[in-house]
Amino acid sequence: MAELEIEIVPVLRDNYAYLVREPASGAVAAIDPGAAAPVRAALERRGWRPSHVLVTHHHHDHTAGCAEIKAAYGCPLVGPRAEAVRIAGLDEGLGDGDTFALGRAAAEVIATPGHTLGHVAFWFAGAKALFCGDTLFVMGCGRLSEGGPEAMWASLKRLRALAEEGRVYCGHEYTETNARFALRLEPGNSALRTRAAEVERLRAAGRPTVPSTIAEERRTNPFLRCDEDAFRAAVGLAGKDAVAVFAEVRRRKDAF
Ligand code: ZN
Ligand code: FE
């Protein structure tokens, strides 16, 4: 299956943009460029030229660099059709079930409403790489800035169902806070303690906590465990349905 070369580009305060190159064709996607300069510098360093700019949702911290990169390299801007009116210069709109071709690699477009209404994730099934913007974070999930808890829970369930070895490339480095919050919910969970220690070690060394894997997220992301009896009991919500548990845990995180 097609391998991809993936470069993590830290931008702004705690955002991640990504460069994804399909080696057989040399096609390169610049994903969620919240600022142009660091993304252009990474492209120059690698000697890559973007064939596409790709965005997961309309927020500025994911799109502010699009116009400059488009202009510098003459490549199209591709993103969620449902947010076309909010993404300046969108050339191609994609929706749920569409395929985005990057050279010989293909990404399935998965609609993941919740953080924003039109948010999409890109799943490269061959390379098993997921670019999920602000829907799923390492040990966390995005705020409900437009959608409700039903929509976000449904989106998270779809991502959770992807191949467990799938690598998770998310839009922010929020992992230390997310780990602290997860431990606040379940202080006795040893898998969480182990992971929180690993996260701390990575950050102390100045390294990103991405990519995570779907398997790790299933085990240690509280927002993916809202239908697990042990989790519901641990957070004092035994017997509640998954959406109610998700809504309450998200509310607690907002106040954390
Ligand atoms: Zn956002
Ligand atoms: Fe964001």
Image (spheres, rainbow, N blue to C red):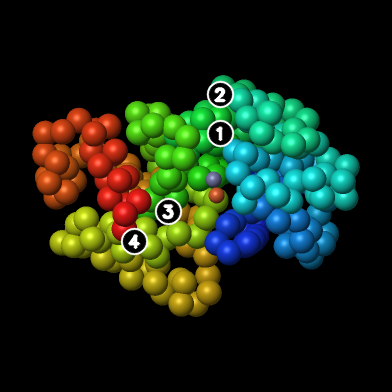
Q: Which mark is residue 179?
A: 4
- In the rendered image, which quarter contains the C terminus? bottom left
Per the image, the residue denoted by label 1 is 120
Q: Secondary structure at mark 2?
A: loop
Residue 54 visible at all: yes
Front residue of 39/147: it is 147
Per the image, the residue denoted by label 2 is 96
Q: Secondary structure at mark 3?
A: loop
**Type of the residue with mark 1:** Val
Residue 199's spot in the image, x, y percent?
40, 67
**Type of the residue with mark 2:** Asp
Per the image, the residue denoted by label 3 is 138
Residue 228's spot in the image, x, y percent?
20, 39
Q: Residues within 10 Å of mark 3 (few under 14, many from 20)?
A: many
- In the rendered image, which quarter contains the N terminus? top right
In the figure, is residue 49 to the left or right of 204?
right
* First reached walking from the N terminus: tag 3 or tag 2: 2
Front residue of 15/26: it is 15
- Tell me the residue at 29%/66% (across/down): 194
